[in-house]
Image: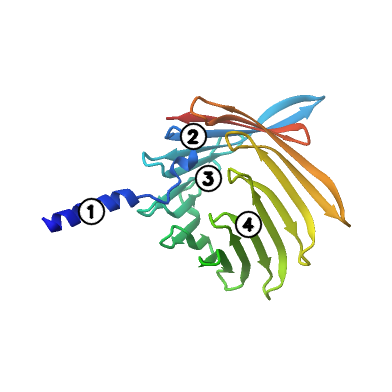
Amino acid sequence: MKKTIVFLFIIFVSCNTSLKYLNQFDGYNGKPKKIESTTYKVEYKDSIATEKMAFKNIEFYDNKGRKIKTLMYKSDGSLSTGGIFYSYDKFGNQIRSIMYNRDSTINSENINKYDKYGKKVERIYKSGNRGSSTKRIYDRENKTVQIIGKNSDGSFKENAIQKFDDKWNEIELISYDSIGNQKTRIEFGYDKNYNLNSYKWYNSKNELYNFSKTTFNENNDPVIARGYRVKNKDTTLNKTTKFEYKYDGKGNIIEQKLFSNDKFVWMTKYNYEY
């Protein structure tokens, strides 16, 4: 009897920990099987705007919410690649993605490794004779991560330190050169809903030179982002980006318009198969 209880407990725990690190359906509502997004570039002639297709992506999900395939199309409607295919471990971590050429040969491959907390600790990238590896070393007590990247020939790729808050939201990223000198530093800020709403960029001398502020709507989608430049202690507005949305009955975006400095420049339309 005791063995039976233990066995049933193991099954219960396994069922409840399965896919626990998966962001099901990439956060979309309604458990969509397929999402088609078509992006248009807005061109102007004699002040008349014309929307021309730039590219289209179709993403496919299984019934557990794992993205299993992405197909990408060019502006003429033809496939730009042979697609990207994804595989996962039992906890829902994406452990491999392979992009194929249109002739079914492999274009590139990403292999990911994770720790017991579902945090990525290594990424291996391969493309033909080129490749790289990036390791992430966690200090969970101090909420920091050291990022060390090397190219396949052993040469330097990247060296950085990430800092996080108690909820593991990234609050700082410091990038270094191959001999350990600071190149840049970025600070990140969040609103009350934990939307990433501010960036501050510093140079190698820790001097602020750019920053941005973003506001979000009730759906936690960005509606306006302003970028500023700082030079000789003077601050100027560099760029304003605005977004407009339409939603379906499930709360998913079906149309997104992007305005740069009040000029309509991009639009993406979404179709969902539930």
Callout 4: SS = strand
Work out whether 12 lies above or below 262.
Answer: below
Residue shown at the point (35%, 53%) measured from the top left: 90
Q: Quadrant of the N terminus?
A: bottom left
Work out whether 45 lies above or below 125.
Answer: above
For label 1, the residue is 9
For label 2, the residue is 35
Residue shown at the point (58%, 43%) measured from the top left: 193
Task: Mark 2 or mark 4: name the one nearer the start of the chain.
Answer: 2
Tell me residue 205's x, y (percent): 78, 67
Q: Amino acid at mark 2?
A: Ile
Callout 3: SS = loop
For label 4, the residue is 171
Q: Amino acid at mark 4?
A: Ile
Task: Mark 1 or mark 3: name the one nearer the start of the chain.
Answer: 1
Q: Nearer the viewer, mark 3 or mark 4?
A: 4
Badge 1, how many Cα within 10 Å: few under 14, some, many 20+? few
Callout 2: SS = strand
Q: Nearer the viewer, mark 1 or mark 3?
A: 1
Q: CA distance from mark 1 to mark 3?
A: 46 Å
Badge 3, how many Cα within 10 Å: few under 14, some, many 20+? some
For label 3, the residue is 81
Task: Mark 3 or mark 4: name the one nearer the start of the chain.
Answer: 3
Tell me residue 67's x, y (percent): 44, 44
